[in-house]
Image (cartoon, rainbow, N blue to C red):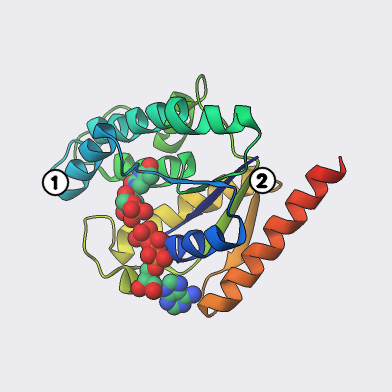
Amino acid sequence: MLVTLEGLDGSGKTTVWAALQERYPDAVFTREPTDDSWYGEAVYRSIEDDDADSLAELFLYTADHAAHLTRVIDPALERGDLVISDRYSDSRFAYQGATLANSERDYGLEDPLEYVVDVHEPFSITPDLTIYLDLDPETAAERAGATNKFEHADYLADVQANYERLIERERDRFVRVDATQDPDAVLERVETVLEQELEERNGE
Ligand SMILES: Nc1ncnc2c1ncn2[C@@H]1O[C@H](COP(=O)(O)OP(=O)(O)OP(=O)(O)O)[C@@H](O)[C@H]1O
Ligand SMILES: Cc1cn([C@H]2C[C@H](O)[C@@H](COP(=O)(O)O)O2)c(=O)[nH]c1=O
């Protein structure tokens, strides 16, 4: 089963992801951008470049995703492992959807979010469950510390709007968790959601 954690920068995904490792010692814990491949390194270079071309950046993230699927996700799912990823394709749909929409250059994309979804369609795997840590853009930017070009409230507001579009059309896959709660309460809620999903699947 593939479970993904999504949300704005600073919403607490990595905090939850790290805590879940104690609860699920046999699961495969992974993340995007990857932090153990040259594809991921290329993505981090782009994140640091305020003038990066938005379309090129989309394809760097997508290349990292493709290699991540081949190297980590596919084999783990084939073994029947539980996979928990800190960010996954919805991050691309929401973030690059917003970046492309706001780009100075006109790429001729009618609906950037749909374009990014379509790029993934032939080769990617849709998660079984996506936990969305819901936080307002201002608090998210504050918690994240505004250390990169994405961590600003006005940009994160556009990203949030894109996440809402994604949630609206896949209500069964997404579970929203209130990320304004204290970290223990957030973790407890995430664990409950995950347990319920695992029980349902085991009972099938
Ligand atoms: N529920 C919470 N309440 C208050 N602060 C939190 C909460 N969860 C995490 N934090 C703090 O917010 C900051 C960002 O948390 P974290 O790195 O887990 O977020 P993230 O969603 O993974 O961010 P990013 O996407 O930018 O990597 C950290 O300082 C963390 O300690
Ligand atoms: C996977 C992915 C990530 N991003 C952005 C979101 C963050 O600002 C950075 C780095 O991610 P981290 O969780 O803070 O380490 O990259 C993105 O724009 N598109 C993506 O697909």
- Note whether 68 is above or below 11 in the view shown: above
Question: Going 77% across and 56% down the picture, which residue do you hit?
Answer: 196
Q: Residue furthest right?
A: 203
Q: Secondary structure beneath disc 1?
A: loop
Q: Is residue 149 left or right of residue 138?
A: left
Residue type at tag 2: Arg
Instruction: State which quadrant residue 106 falls in.
Output: top left
Where residue 30 appears, as percent x and y from the top left, is 45, 45
Where residue 162 appears, as percent x and y from the top left, is 47, 49
Residue at the disc numbered 2: 173
Where residue 148 appears, as percent x and y from the top left, is 21, 58
Task: Report the disc number at residue 49.
Answer: 1
Who is closer to the viewer here, 134 or 153? 134
Q: Is residue 198 visible?
A: yes
Where residue 170 appears, as percent x and y from the top left, is 65, 43
Question: Going 43% across and 60% down the picture, which residue do you hit?
Answer: 14
**Marks 1 and 2, how far apart in space?**
33 Å
